[in-house]
Amino acid sequence: MSKVKYRYNTETLTYEPIEQGIRYKVKRFFQFASSSAILGIFYFLGFSYIFDSPKEKRLARENSRLLSQYEIMDKKLQQIQIALDDIQQRDEKIYRVIYQADSIPNSIRRAGFGGMNRYKHLENLDNADLVINTARKLDIIMKQLYVQSKSFDEIIDLTLRKEEMLRCIPAIQPVSNKDLRRTASGYGWRIDPIYKVKKFHEGMDFSAPIGTEVYATGEGVVKRVVKSFGGYGNHIEIDHGFGYTTLYAHLDRFNVKKGQKVKRGDVIGFVGNTGKSTGPHLHYEVRVKGRPVNPAHYYFQDLTPDQFEKMIQIASNSHQTFD
């Protein structure tokens, strides 16, 4: 038997029984259910805020692991960059120097990526800065590796052509000069014989009688055969390939034609006294990629170490040129 509940009526000052019909019970049920649902939602939200779900814990562990992997990758990329920098230095200062290959400027080796933002699709990721920085480093290294690979292809090609290059390098004196008595004036600042002022002498002078044979100092193709009354006078220029050219000036006459192939030791002309010259001699120049260099450094097939030192001394002591 259910208990009867009463409520106090302040107007009549009496206790009146509370009706507990179906409507009352349904109303009470919904009130209780609503309160329980609201309370449950608050408990759920509070629990979720304080404690991670198993799925969230798993995702957090995966995110932490990925973050660690990116950091490890970033360190490895730094190590790869250091190794690549060393390879590039060897390429520039050893291999390309040996084979007289053009230097690859840093503007090409380390060129960036222009145009649109290639990492825009990564900006919405967690730890976007780390991911983008790692992706950028990887792209730069890949590009540098491509440039270095092409550089080594060029070096390999030059290596395979080594024998041809050795035949082409100007490696002997242009006139017979075993006793070095024909060494007249060397490369560098000298007194001009006509104007009596210091002038940079871009070659070497060899004094010799008119008609003395002049030899091609390396294999190549005759680039120019010029007759002239001034400057170099009658002169020949030979293109040896691999960036080397040689010039033979103040000749009396020629023994080759333009376009003719010559070998080291071939007689290409004869010593004369033409052009801006104060006596019979041969003015000889060696150029590498268009720049004059000291010809004495290229007589390695002609001179012993002692003869080389003596030639340098003779050439240095001469303070005046013949042209």
Image: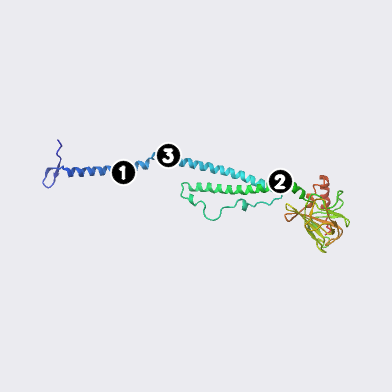
Residue placed at 31% from the left, 43% from the top? 41
Q: Position of residue 309 (x, y in %)?
A: 82, 47
- Residue type, numbered disc 2: Leu
The disc, 3 or 1, on the residue closer to the chain's N-terminal end is 1
Tag 3's secondary structure? helix
The disc, 1 or 2, on the residue closer to the chain's N-terminal end is 1
The disc, 2 or 3, on the residue closer to the chain's N-terminal end is 3
Q: Which mark is residue 58?
A: 3
Q: Nearer the viewer, mark 3 or mark 1?
A: 3
Tag 2's secondary structure? helix
100 and 219: which one is in front? 219
Q: Nearer the viewer, mark 2 or mark 3?
A: 2
- Residue type, numbered disc 3: Arg
- Residue type, numbered disc 1: Ile
Q: Nearer the viewer, mark 1 or mark 2?
A: 2
Q: Position of residue 180 (x, y in %)?
A: 86, 50
Judge the density around disc 1: few (<14), some (14-19), many (≥20) Cα neighbours within 10 Å: few
Residue at the extreme top = 1
- Residue 196 position by quadrant: bottom right
131 and 240: which one is in front? 240
Task: Read off the residue under disc 2.
Answer: 160
Q: Position of residue 107 (x, y in %)?
A: 62, 53
Task: Read off the residue under disc 1.
Answer: 41
Quadrant for the C terminus in the image: bottom right
Residue placed at 48% from the left, 48% from the top? 128
- Number of marks in picture: 3
Give the Cα separation between the discs numbered 2 and 3: 58 Å
